[in-house]
Amino acid sequence: MDNSLLVVGSVAFDHVQTPAGERDESLGGSATYFSYSASFFVPVKLVAVIGEDFPQKHIDMLKKRNIDTTGLVRQPGKTFRWAGSYMQNLNEAETLSTELNVFENFKPELPESYKDTPYVFLANINPELQLDVLNLTRSPKFVACDTMNLWINYKKPQLIKLLGKIDLIVLNDAEAKMLTESDNIIKAARAIQSYGPKSVVVKKGEHGALLVHGDDIFTVPAYPLETVVDPTGAGDTFAGGMLGYICKSGKTDTMTLKKAMAYGTVMASFNVQDFSMNNLFGLTEHAIEERLQDLIRKSSLHEFVNR
Amino acid sequence: MDNSLLVVGSVAFDHVQTPAGERDESLGGSATYFSYSASFFVPVKLVAVIGEDFPQKHIDMLKKRNIDTTGLVRQPGKTFRWAGSYMQNLNEAETLSTELNVFENFKPELPESYKDTPYVFLANINPELQLDVLNLTRSPKFVACDTMNLWINYKKPQLIKLLGKIDLIVLNDAEAKMLTESDNIIKAARAIQSYGPKSVVVKKGEHGALLVHGDDIFTVPAYPLETVVDPTGAGDTFAGGMLGYICKSGKTDTMTLKKAMAYGTVMASFNVQDFSMNNLFGLTEHAIEERLQDLIRKSSLHEFVNR
């Protein structure tokens, strides 16, 4: 069984300010965080664009994690750069600047070896590019996407079109409310389902995440942490853990999605404990399993089920 | 075994604005919500003051729920009144006005039949009054309290003194951060423990609640609701369900506190589904148990425990 996972999204350098400090030229980007997180579960095929300034050592690091970089293309110019601040709010970044650079004219292509990948994640980029990539795949088994306020504001028709073609969307609470003009996240998730996806995951930062899957509703808290160093990439790491587990299990029933949300929560919790992806680098599958069990211990009411 | 529960707090008339509408002269007050909620679990002894305008029908209604109103004293003047708006934020009321009225010179006294009550809840009132009531009791088994931003700002020394004498405090996330000057609720809860209470419950409105009990940490989500009509009294109803269950079980171990939080969550969820206490009036123990099981179904990861 081919259980590999295709992701298209951004690879970037970030400049990040948080109450814990400041970092410049950190490795970032939605596809980078997603790939690295998912690589703990399944082989990942990465589609993205980098500039001439992107060091080979980062590519080698991704390859070591069994991430296929055939679709990572280098183009003339500079790598995408993002600067953000979490000084006011650890749950949501204030974007200070965005330099599209090589992303400005990016036209994604899929290597032939990528086209039959059964699981596809369209990470946060322009929904037109997300649609382009989806159209280049051959009947994937399960397609998921993320998005952001920028696209809800400026590319809503394209985003709605995309939603008609996917199985699962992962987005944050402010985005879900904005997209549906609803003030309640469950109502918002139901409205998003009406656009196409059977499953909607609403991420609430430190407050956890909500899954609406068909008629089912399920909530997972964030893993309780006393110190959050850098929330950058938390949502992408969450999605990487979630999709990684779905892809690994080969199933998309409620039970699988619940456990996938828990793995997403665990991966995001590791990610926010240090700047950039630093805390993911030394991570082991054993540590992931340990934290999953700890999350269950700290949140499950299972002792009180009426049998 | 005497498993009754003493509560001192406010009995009030509320004027409330929410996106769902507006209500005037609604029955409210921290002790009213608490008592009614706790009465589904144990007999309650109420200490509060009302004015000449408080109708007998409300007192009769409380008595029917096995709430002892011997300590509910009527004094010359008007009943306490509070006006608040949730138009901007369903999670936190904007106080529009507070008329202390009979509360202004309230000096609580305890009927002799109340003094040996084993479980005591000091609902949100001036911490000096909370201390007065506590000093009138004879060696209670378990004491809990609530508070609010007003007292943290203006009566912090008295509040800190109170914290040295209690077992459990229930307060909201903004209050926990304000009291401890911390930006993380787990750190805040740890700091509050250092003032005395072994157990701290931080309420996060629609995001659920966090328990820190000794070294243990436990989270419970809010019961997912598509429609919230009026959040007034949610925190007091939560505390009523929580303390009611603790008192009924006669235990204060981690497992009991976890289940108590779940009952608090369930009681609060019923309360916010209609204005004032309207949705509590027709409530049955069967409906409470059903919703508890549904909360567990919608939030527990118990299938994934490693055995």
Image (cartoon, coloured by chain):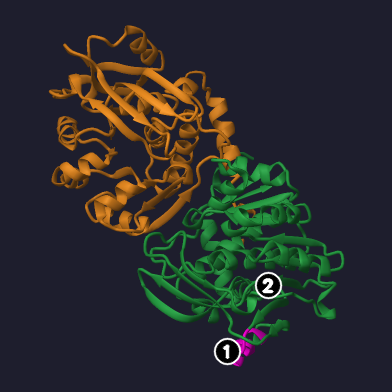
Chain colours: A orange, B green
Camera-side residue of A148 and A129: A148
Residue A49 versus residue B74 in the image, above or below: above
Q: Residue at x 20, y 26 (%)?
A: A115
Residue A198 is left or right of residue A40, and the answer is left
Q: Which label was assigned to residue B41?
A: 2
- Label 2: chain letter: B
Camera-side residue of A186 and A66: A186
Residue B165 versus residue A147 in the image, above or below: below
Choose mark 2 or mark 1, whichever is in front: 1
Which residue appears farthest toward the bottom when viewing the image?
Answer: B56
Residue B124 is left or right of residue A239, and the answer is right
Camera-side residue of A250 and A76: A76
Figure quadrant of the N terminus of chain A: top left
Chief SS of the magenta region: helix
Q: Which label was assigned to residue B97?
A: none
Q: CA distance from mark 2 to mark 1?
A: 30 Å
| Residue pointed to by mark 1 | B53
Camera-side residue of A89 and A186: A89
What secondary structure is found at the residue carrying circle 1? loop
Q: Which amino acid type corresponds to the residue marked 1 in the rendered image? A: Asp
* B53 within the magenta span: yes
Figure quadrant of the C terminus of chain A: bottom right
- Label 1: chain letter: B
Residue A77 versus residue A15 in the image, above or below: above
Residue B49 is left or right of residue A44, and the answer is right
Q: Position of residue A46 (x, y in %)?
A: 29, 22
Q: Which residues are magenta?
A: B51-63
- Disc 2 residue crowd, few under 14, some 14–19, many 20+, Cα 10 Å: many
Give the image quarter of residue B293: bottom right
What secondary structure is found at the residue carrying circle 2? loop
Q: Residue at x 29, y 28 (%)?
A: A7
- Disc 1 residue crowd, few under 14, some 14–19, many 20+, Cα 10 Å: few
